[in-house]
Amino acid sequence: MRSVITHKAKANLPTTYGRFEIHVFEDNEKKEHTVLIRGKISPKKPVLVRVHSLCFTGDTLGSTKCDCGLQLHAALKKIAREGGVLVYLQQEGRGIGLANKIKAYALQEKGMDTVEANTTLGFKDDARDYTVGAQILAYLGVRKMRLLTNNPRKIEGLQHYQLEITERVPLILPVYKASKRYMMVKQEKLGHLLENRGVVR
């Protein structure tokens, strides 16, 4: 398969979770994707990996409409403890972009769920493609992984690229009251495997 990524930069990055090595990759659409690495990668050993799609509202603004921010920070804590890789992809709104995600939010305020809103706007329920993420992992030397995810479609998407997933590591998180319906739809319509720790305000 033709490569769609270019490695652009790397440096060390101290964070509140610990010190990581940060890498930036660019795809053939000029989108930049970020990787954080903790420890050494061996192609012979399963690496703890989180492939995370950008969610500006959840990851940065702390929105309680989704569980994205909770997933990101739980993954960073676990990778900081055990070593591993976080691949942070520019796939806002399950691949539809920020403006369209906010349009979908407006439709949800009128009674639609997240899937109905996306399809009403003319998009798939999940428009993400994992080619970039898979190629980044291969570039880094990851061949086997323990994947931090609750999403079976992500497992299927990455397995197409000769990456062996030896284990699915679930993210067991609380649920915000504002996201209860969203989480139910993720489970019932998108097939997510959710084990939750109860509801928080």
Image (spheres, grey):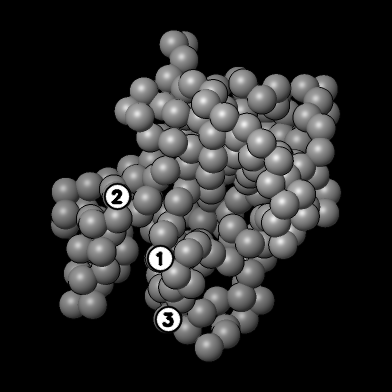
Tag 3's secondary structure? helix
Q: Quadrant of residue 28?
A: top left
Q: Position of residue 122 (x, y in %)?
A: 16, 48
| Residue 139 appears in the rendering | yes
| Residue 116 appears in the rendering | no
Left/right placement of residue 97 relative to residue 74 reads left
Tag 2's secondary structure? loop
Q: Earlier in the sequence, mark 1 or mark 2?
A: 1
Q: Position of residue 3 (x, y in %)?
A: 46, 15
The disc placed on residue 97 is: 2
Report, in whole angstroms, how far the alpha carbon at label 1 lies from the one at label 2.
Answer: 12 Å
Residue at 58% x, 54% y is 150
Q: Nearer the viewer, residue 22 or 83?
A: 22
Residue located beneath label 3 in the image: 178
Q: Is residue 119 above or below residue 12?
A: below
Q: Quadrant of residue 65?
A: bottom left
Q: Is residue 24 above or below residue 197?
A: above
Q: Nearer the viewer, residue 45 or 11?
A: 11
- Say what amino acid the circle numbered 3 marks: Ala
Residue at 41% x, 60% y is 56
Residue at 82% x, 54% y is 81
Q: Position of residue 163 (x, y in %)?
A: 63, 25
Residue located beneath label 1 in the image: 57
